Amino acid sequence: MKALHLFTAVIALSMSAAALAHDPSEKVTVLQDQMLKNAPGKKAMMIEVDYKPGQSSIAHKHDGTAMAYVLEGEVISQVKGEQPITYKKGQFWYEPAGSEHLVSKNASNSKPAKLLVFMVLAPDEQVLIPLKN
């Protein structure tokens, strides 16, 4: 549930450059939020996400395309229609826009994990949309 606060902060930041409003135990760093000159009407966001041991995100989807790269630790990820996969440091995955991300969690209960997330979306699109079930 704490990861909900993380993505809520990212949503707030995507709508405004205002300060992040998230759970203080979460660490989300927006590295870049830039309009793309070669793709009119789209922007790129680069976000660093830190998962504490045992931490997970709520099930969600993104309006934009997302690509994630594991900087530290191991992360379990599952997109609807696929099996969960454990990604280790140096591995990455791609989520097409609208994909339902059912599982995103730190694979370890004792070590932190860190992701670098790159997204392409329109300025009015949401970074994260919680799934109802």
Image (cartoon, rainbow, N blue to C red):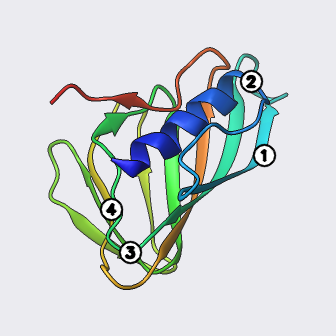
Measure the alpha-carbon separation of dots 2 and 4.
27 Å
Residue 59 placement (x, y as % from top left): 27, 41
- Rate crowding at label 4 as few (under 14), some (14 to 19) or many (20 or more) other CA atoms within 10 Å: many
Q: Which residue is mark 1?
A: 32
* Mark 3 touches mark 1? (CB < 8 Å): no
Tell me which label, 3 or 1, sits earlier in the chain. Answer: 1
Q: Nearer the viewer, mark 3 or mark 1?
A: 3
Three-letter code, disc 3:
Pro
Q: In the visual, does 85 lie left or right of 121? A: left
Percent x, y of residue 133: 15, 30
**Residue tagged 4:** 105
Secondary element type, mark 3: loop
- Residue for point 42% across, 84% down: 111
Task: Quote the CA–CA distance across marks 4 and 3.
Answer: 9 Å
Which amino acid type corresponds to the residue marked 2 in the rendered image?
Ser
Residue 71: x and y, percent?
57, 74
**Could you say whether the residue bearing mark 2 is in a helix, strand or loop?**
loop
Q: CA distance from mark 2 to mark 1?
A: 13 Å
Q: Secondary structure at mark 4?
A: strand
**Dot placed on the residue nearer the N-terminal end, 2 or 4:** 2
Among numbered discs 2 and 1, the one appearing first in the sequence: 2
Which corner quadrant of the image does residue 76 belong to? bottom left
User: Which one is in front in this view, the residue at disc 2 or the one at disc 1?
Assistant: 2
Q: Amino acid at mark 4?
A: Lys
Q: Which residue is mark 2?
A: 16
